[in-house]
Amino acid sequence: MKKKILVLALALVIVAVAVVCVSCAKKEELKDGKVSYTIVNNTGKKVTEITLSDRKSDNKVESKPEEGGMPDGDSIGLELPVKLENDTTADVMFGYTVEGGDNVTGSIMKVNGTITMKIVDGSLTFDIQ
């Protein structure tokens, strides 16, 4: 009987230590930073709106190119204040709209790079390098 109580007490101590260790685990802190992208229009159409937004804060940048839109072949630079993990990972939503109203959005994890807007098989898309 004493062995059972001793084993049970030891098991409870192990569980308690495990709970404390899990609760003390250091959570990843978010740090203020910014992302910077060069955005290139290779769609063959004018781009009428570009949006960058940080999914971890309310920060957002919208660009509405003048004179009816950003012509094919043009590029612009945009920066966005963000919350960063490990100083290297951002969680940014990127989207754009072309003349006629078609649009696309998607997630970008890179902090800096060149985003190329394009049409593949008739559908709007983008890639980042």
Image (cartoon, rainbow, N blue to C red):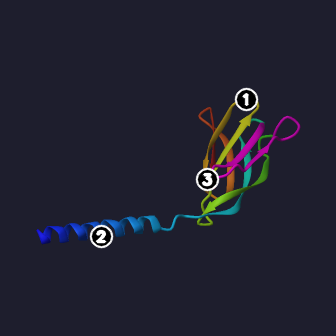
Circle 3: is it few (<14), some (14-19), or many (20+) Cα within 10 Å? many
> Which callout, 2 or 1, points at the residue further toward the start of the chain?
2
| Residue at 38% across, 64% down | 19
Left/right of residue 8 with respect to residue 37 in the rendered view: left
Q: Do the residues labelled 2 and 3 touch (CB within 8 Å)?
A: no
Residue that sits furthest to the right in the current view: 67
Q: Which residue is identified by label 3?
A: 91
Name the mark nearer the viewer: 1 or 3: 3
Few, some or many C-alpha atoms within 10 Å of disc 2 (few <14, some 14-19, many ≥20)?
few
Q: Name the residue under label 2.
A: 13
Earlier residue among tags 2 and 3: 2
- Could you tell me the amino acid type at mark 3? Asp
Dot 1 falls on a residue whose secondary structure is: loop
> In the image, is residue 85 above or below residue 70?
below
Q: Which residue lies furthest to the top in this view?
A: 100
Q: Which of marks 2 and 3 is in front?
A: 2
Residue type at the position of mark 1: Gly
Residue at 13 percent across and 71 percent down: it is 3
In magenta stretch: residue 65: yes
Residue farthest along the left direction in this orientation: 1
In the image, which is nearer the foreground, mark 2 or mark 1? 2
Kindly check if marks 1 and 3 are in contact, taking CB atoms under 8 A apart as contact.
no
Boundaries of the magenta span: 47-70
Could you say where residue 109 lies in the image, as x and y percent from the top left? 60, 54
Label 2, label 1: how far apart the Cα atoms are: 63 Å
Tag 3 or tag 1, which sits nearer the N-term? Answer: 3
